[in-house]
Amino acid sequence: MTLLSIAKNEDCKQRMLQEGLTRLAIHSLIGSSEKEREYAVKLLLEFSSDEAYCKSIASEKGALVLLSSMAGDLEHPAISNLAEEILKRLEKVDDNVQHLVAAGRFEPLLHRLIEGTDDVRIEMASMVGKMTLTNSSKEQIARQGAKILVEMLFKPEGRTPSLQALYNLSALDDNATILVDAGVLMALADILFQNQDGEQDLKELAASTIANIVLKPGHWELACVNKKGASMQSESIVHSLLGILSHSSPKGEVAVLQILHGIASSPQASEAVATHIDSGGGVTIILQFLEHPEADHRIYAFRLIRILSERLGQVLANELKASNSIPLLQAKLSDTQCSDGERSDSACILSNLPLTENEVKTVLETSLIKWVVTSLKSSERTSRPSSAMVEGLLGLLLHFVRFPDPMVLDAVREHQLLTIFRDQLCFSSQPRLKQRAALGLKYLSESGRALVSPTDFEPLPPKGFFSSMFSCGKAPKVPQTCPIHSFPCEDESQICLLKGNCIKPLLDLLNDEDTNVQITVVEALSTLVSDTTCYSRRAADELERLGVSDAVIDLFTEVRTGELQEKTIWMVERILRVESHAQRYSINQTLVRALVEAFKHGNSNTKRHAQDALTNLKQISGVSGKNSSQTRLRR
């Protein structure tokens, strides 16, 4: 209190400042007594009456942080108001702006950025570009200052500092929308694609900023990036990116690969981007980076090729074969020196390639199955297995189980692939993993049916794997046959969904949130019912006992017109071929209405199945064909 009284005198105040009492007052801000803190704030308020003293207050370590904390303390309004008044005075001094920003007060910077002269704006932008900012700070600056920073990009003297600032702000995903709305993409594209010497650093920075923005899909896809109205995913822009990819600096190459990966990953833009990359010869260009000596180049090239493999599988397969690059991808799988990302991307790329049966055996080779199974089991022991790696490994197994080759089926039994697919179906949370697991079960079930002749129901002559897959030898007079295959399948069979205990896991996914998963599950269940009369009757009886019939019919009554409806009605129609089942479901008016709607609005296949199903339910008269009333299956 005494010091506060003395400070009223100007000469005494100067003497006190010379003696370092500013530091003492700041230290008293954390005093134990509320009165001590109040007098310390009042003393600092007295010191701050002169602009020259404001700089020394701001430069004292911790002063602004303590004052900012007190200014926000609503429990002590008197002290809070005094602290706020001190800060307002400090904000008027230009040299204090950086100290204030470091303490979390951005209003002085933003005010100067928005209202200041060109020179002041450049200084503020430079400050933003060099600072380490919290996410909330980045959002605050972007919301209030993005438009000014974008305007500065069109002026040569302000281009570098504003570009550095925008790059810093773009590191926050949530700022992508703000920056796009401010028109940043057009300005950045202008810098990136213009042919001026001596601006390589700016081009790198522009590319890196765009890469950050397109990392998050959902908004930039609608923005124009030039005066002609082109978007990031337009042909001209994609071709321009491919063009500069071959002539950029190493840092620029990485940024362009990141941009291409970002726009190719967007659900709204991926199809167009893949098409334009193909038409621009981009696959050949990008493949070259898979063997780049720098890790960043390889990582983003692998990520991009993985995305493209989902849409350009055949094009990519042709390029990989022409350049003899498939062995490179195979080598990456087991190379422990590679990053996990490169290995998982290699697995996914290989799994997405359309390979013939001969190519699977000669290029991938059956011995790969053992390595894949070992890797899958190893990933299960980790706390957080990479979903991308598991997806790729399951995809590699799909290559083998698509074809009922005797050697492959021997490996299926030895490594219990059906069990692996079933377990992935039960424990995976990612839609892609569940879809691939269900697809594996479908292929194995189809292989099981292929082992039995469709014209008679006697087992095939035992050969190698076949003899160990089914119980053969001297068959009893009345064999205990599987109702699906009319064949004595072994328990835990690796090609029978019933004996392999796969039906319940499939049923559990009929109502999955992902439609693609539902479609694949229905396809897998459909392998239990064939077009053959005897199979259809016996399988339908078993499916009714297991609750499959009810579940599939319930799903059909809920789905809309589309692929899932078409897949489901195929199975429904076959279930209803059995007369006793048709009689039971004929009173289900919800089913009848759904069939009528499918008959009215479905595609040609759906309409045909709906007509046959309604005929079996005696809702319409049978006209002709295998499902007429004369060929109905009876018990």
Image (cartoon, rainbow, N blue to C red):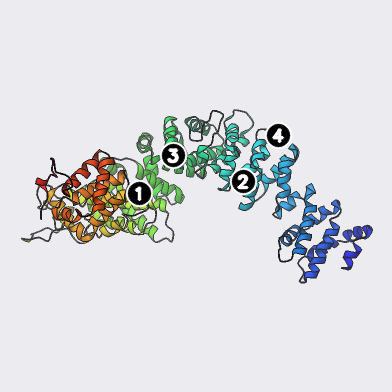
Residue 78 point in image, percent of width and height = 77, 64
Check the picture and name the quadrant holding the C terminus: bottom left
Q: Nearer the viewer, mark 4 or mark 1?
A: 1
Of the numbered discs in the image, which one, if any, rests on residue 515?
Answer: 1
* Number of dots carrying numbers: 4
Which amino acid does the dot numbered 1 rest on?
Answer: Thr
Which residue is at a point 80% across and 70% down the rendered structure image? 35
Asked which secondary structure carries label 4, the reply is: helix
Instruction: Report crowding for label 2: few under 14, some 14 to 19, many 20 or more residues within 10 A (C-alpha).
Output: many
Q: Is residue 140 left or right of residue 413?
A: right
Residue 264 point in image, percent of width and height = 46, 40
Q: Is residue 11 left or right of residue 461?
A: right
Asked if the residue at tag 3 contacts the one at tag 2, i.e. Cβ–Cβ closer than 8 Å, the answer is no
Which amino acid does the dot numbered 4 rest on?
Answer: Glu
**How far is disc 2 from disc 1 in space, using C-alphas?**
37 Å
Q: Is residue 134 visible?
A: no
Q: Is residue 173 above or below residue 37?
A: above
Which residue is at a point 61% across and 52% down the rendered structure image? 135
